[in-house]
Amino acid sequence: MPLEIQVLQNMSSQKTGAIIVKLIGSLDTATAPQLERELEPVMSRCGKDLMFDLAGLKFISSAGLRVFSVVRKQLKERGGQASFINMQPQITEVFEIIKALPGVGVFANEAEFDAYLAARQKMIQENL
């Protein structure tokens, strides 16, 4: 199954610079390199946070989890975070079974993610 990748600016979080990456299809050994290539320019222009919308992701393999792990590490070095929303039950199960990405934010939807970002920014501003 192919992988469709859509990169969108999170309109409700323009101040944060968060970018949404929608994945549709299968993220596996055959498609993970495609995602890596398409994420290179995204990572260079995104701020600290990147949100993956997985509503259309039907399958993920360890190769896909590795891509997420690399992105997570790069964002963590910037003081940011990779987050995931709209995960299908089978994808949630993979994350739960292997605990592949400890400390990663998983959100029910974009609104919940935006609320998290707002609270995080407020906390940072209060500590300045």
Image (cartoon, helix red, strand yellow):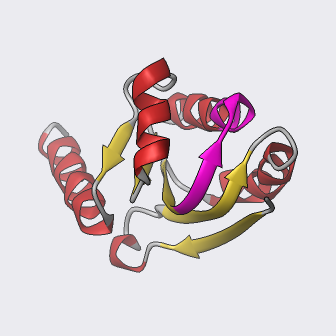
Q: Residue at x 48, y 47 (%)?
A: 48
Q: Residue at x 58, y 66 (%)?
A: 22
Tell whether 114 sits left or right of 42.
Answer: left
Residue 15 in the image: x percent, y percent? 37, 69
Query: Over which residues does the magenta segment extend?
Result: 56-67
Work out which quarter of the rendered image holds the N terminus and state it. bottom right
Q: Which of 93 and 50 is in front in this view?
A: 93
Visible residue check, residue 99:
no
Tell whether 1 sits left or right of 125.
Answer: right
Q: Which residue lies furthest to the left in this view?
A: 126
Work out which quarter of the rendered image holds the C terminus and state it. top left
Residue 20 in the image: x percent, y percent? 52, 65
Q: Residue at x 29, y 57 (%)?
A: 113
Q: Nearer the viewer, residue 115 or 120?
A: 115
> Image quadrant of residue 21?
bottom right
Q: Which residue is drawn at 40% across and 33% down?
A: 104
Is residue 18 in the magenta section?
no
107 up-or-down from 61: above or below: below
Tell whether 111 sits left or right of 60.
Answer: left
